[in-house]
Image (cartoon, helix red, strand yellow):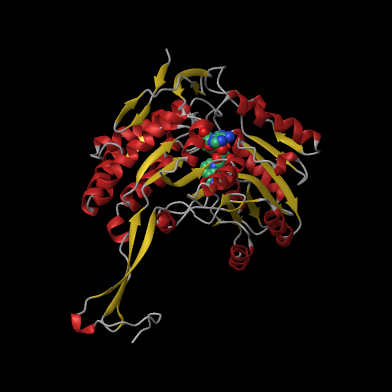
Amino acid sequence: MTTTLNHWINGVENEGASTRTSPVFNPARGEISTQVRLASTADVDAAVASAAAAFPAWRDASLAKRQSILFNFRELLNQRKGELADILTAEHGKVTADALGEIARGLEVVEFALGMPHLLKGDYSENVSTDVDVYTIRQALGVVGIISPFNFPAMVPLWYFPIAIAAGNTVVLKPSEKDPTAANWMAALMTEAGLPDGVLNVVHGDKEAVDALLEHPTVQAISFVGSTPIAKYIYETAAAHGKRVQALGGAKNHMLVLPDADLNLAADAAVNAGFGSAGERCMAISVIVAVEPVADELIERITARMAGLRVGDGMRGCDMGPLITEAHRDRVASYIDIAAADGATVVVDGRDVEADGEASGFWLGPTLFDRVSTDSAVYQDEIFGPVLSIVRVDSYEEGLQLINASRYGNGTAIFTNDGGAARRFQNEVQVGMVGINVPIPVPVAYHSFGGWKDSLFGDAKAYGPAGIAFFTREKAVTSRWLDPSHGGINLGFPQHD
Ligand code: NAD
């Protein structure tokens, strides 16, 4: 029996006016579990109106009050993360351990946002001129919109809404329509934690809802994470409507393995970062750049590890779950024929997988290609599935050049025991997040997350110091308290004395 997922507006479920819906699947079964409502412009207007009405009281709520609500949320989320993990596994497909990992990384941001009383402290300069002081304060923007992708239905919203809300903003979240239930679950938990109605609203939908948010005059800022073409569209459209915007896009992350690397460590890293979450991570490793002569030995170690991976229903303790939809599974699988046609060696063909789950699940096993040409679509496209490509090069320089020629610049990693080479790499590589013997270098919550080039549009990264800057406006106050004897007319430009 399928259920219908409503919007969450002003602290309660809301059916909205639109009659359009979209199916949500359990990808391990290939069955529809839920129909999610797709908002009309009028439904988005209602959510924005709710957030706008809540804003004046929320921005004036004390830092202590905002902090205590967020603290309650942190405690509740930690206690009940198992429930949320089950929702993630049921709708996204990722295995339970991975779902709990996603939640843990989201909780980190909640904990960072708990420091808001400290983080919002401004600067103060006493006596910049005689009896004149200058200080800065950081204030909330108003209503902000968050648009998130399918691959982290809990973590990506958690990158944004705890910081936005702790800073005094009110929020309209538009999660992915492919796995939307986690957003409602978190919004209800925020209400349980004591958040006033209207501070966090969820509208479900597709392009119509997104466009309504981008164009809405009340919405002050847009935070987006998703694929590159949509990120670019969001950046341009939101900016054209006068909003500040952060738009994080797609990726093609390379792992450079130097001949002196520990190949067991590199093989573990390649398998974990390539096939975790079925490769549906923006920080997944999708290309291994092997500096010869290591390729053959590395492939041997990677394939040995791949043979031990259990693919199946994420609730059954498997290593890797299904892909998000049938269409996406078929698209990812189509690259196997493309690889062969373009001259690559198909070392492991994931279509042969025997999954521990229903035959109707959206399965594709871990797949490995060798000798992939950089001209092939396999190399050029973001495949976003459990597919690793090996490109062989003859030197560090050749590998670096290849990585820097990519249109994407989200994450990268170098595996080596040579500190000088690693230091050179961190300096020379044109990528926003770099791992040194770390395959998925997602920065901790008190740094900021974001790529370069087509992996991020604009200059605003997510969470950490960049998150504070994004969700607040700085105001500089110049103040003088004088007795009346200091008055007088002077039309000259103010100078210091
Ligand atoms: P997507 O771009 O298809 O969707 C993202 C959001 O945009 C969803 O909420 C969706 O409803 C909305 N959307 C989709 N098409 C739209 C359109 N035409 N107009 C307006 N809105 C639209 O992305 P996805 O498939 O959900 O997520 C996977 C992508 O996200 C991958 O490319 C991945 O690399 C990227 N991603 C990037 C990061 C990062 O931090 N850079 C993190 C996670 C995911």
Classify residue 123 by image quadrant: bottom left
**How many numbered marks have been drawn onto this rendered protein structure?**
0
Residue 93, image x and y in percent?
49, 29
| Residue at position x 43%, y 42% in the image | 145
Q: Is residue 301 above or below residue 333?
A: below
Q: Is residue 310 above or below residue 114?
A: above
Q: Residue 77 or 277: which is nearer the viewer? A: 77
The residue furthest bottom is 497
Residue 265, image x and y in percent?
57, 50
Residue 483, image x and y in percent?
18, 80
**Quadrant of the image containing the N terminus:** top left
Q: Residue 369 or 111: which is nearer the viewer? A: 111
Classify residue 138 by image quadrant: bottom left
Classify residue 306 by image quadrant: top right
Q: Is residue 475 above or below residue 217?
A: below
Is residue 124 found left or right of 231 in the rendered image?
left
Residue 25, image x and y in percent?
50, 22
Q: Tell me which image quadrant ligand 1 sits in.
A: top right
| Residue at position x 77%, y 39% in the image | 344
Q: Residue 177 or 386: which is nearer the viewer? A: 177
Is residue 283 found left or right of 469 in the rendered image?
right
**Quadrant of the image containing the C terminus:** bottom left
Say if residue 272 shows up in the picture: no
Is residue 57 found left or right of 299 in the rendered image?
left
Say if residue 424 shows up in the picture: yes
